[in-house]
Each structure stands twice: as structure tokens, then as C-alpha cells.
Image (spheres, rainbow, N blue to C red):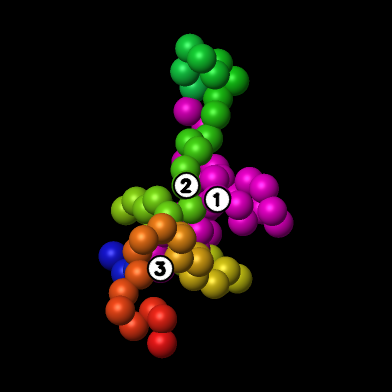
């Protein structure tokens, strides 16, 4: 798996929130899953950084932005 092969760049993923590319979204690779809690069916909700073996590139999307992690800097970040 390459760095950009995640839900954000997958053709089956639809994000929630800002311009449908938010941090969470639904995977539409397979039909909705029917459970006791959701008898009408529901698509799995994933984070934009998640990934799976069914990933296929969405031609109209750039790579996801790197998540900001506090304290995750290197010596060269200040140059």
C-alpha cells in the first residue's frame, strides 16, 4: 500500500462535511449492511485516513492532507 492509498482518495468513499471531503465518510463499495440496529441498512462509516484491500483510485481527488499531530516535528521543520 502506498502512502496516498486511503479512503480519502478511493472512488467508493463519500466524505461528510465540508464539500463532501470531510474527515469522516461512508464507504459505498458494497451494498448497505442490514443489522438489528439499522434494519433498513447502513454503509460503513470510516475516517479519511483508513484503508482496505478494495481501494481504487478516484481520478478526481488529490492525496489527503497529512493529519496534524502535536509534537510530531523534526529538527528540519524549523528551517
| Circles 1 and 2: CB atoms closer than 8 Å | yes
User: Which quadrant of the figure contains the C terminus?
Assistant: bottom left
Q: Which residues are magenta?
A: 4-33
Disc 2 element: strand
Residue that extends furthest to the bottom in the rendered view of this protein: 79
In terms of depth relative to the viewer, which is nearer, 5 or 30? 5
Residue at (50%, 65%) from the top-left corner?
Answer: 64
Q: How would you rate the neighbour count of disc 2 (Cα within 10 Å): few for under 14, some for 14-19, many for 20 or more?
A: some
Q: Position of residue 74 (x, y in %)?
A: 31, 74
Q: Is residue 5 magenta?
A: yes
Choose top left, top right, bottom left or bottom right for residue 71: bottom left
Q: Give the label on residue 23, or none.
A: 1
Q: Position of residue 49 (x, y in %)?
A: 43, 55
How far apart, in angstroms, are the residues tagged by discs 1 and 3?
Answer: 15 Å
Give whichever of discs 1 and 2 has the lower sequence position. Answer: 1
Q: Position of residue 12 (x, y in %)?
A: 52, 53
Q: Give the label on residue 47, or none.
A: 2
Q: Is residue 76 above or below residue 59?
A: below
Residue at (34%, 51%) from the top-left corner?
Answer: 52
Q: Give the label on residue 4, or none.
A: 3
Give whichever of discs 2 and 3 has the lower sequence position. Answer: 3
- Which mark lies nearer to you, 1 or 3? 1
Amino acid at each position: 500500500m502506498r502512502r496516498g492509498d486511503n479512503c480519502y482518495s478511493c472512488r467508493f468513499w463519500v466524505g461528510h462535511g465540508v464539500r463532501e471531503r470531510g474527515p469522516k465518510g461512508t464507504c459505498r463499495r458494497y451494498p448497505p449492511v442490514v443489522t438489528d440496529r439499522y434494519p433498513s441498512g447502513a454503509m460503513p462509516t470510516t475516517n479519511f485516513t483508513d484503508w482496505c484491500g478494495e481501494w481504487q483510485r478516484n481520478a478526481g481527488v488529490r492525496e489527503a492532507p497529512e493529519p496534524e499531530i502535536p509534537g510530531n516535528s523534526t529538527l528540519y521543520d524549523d528551517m
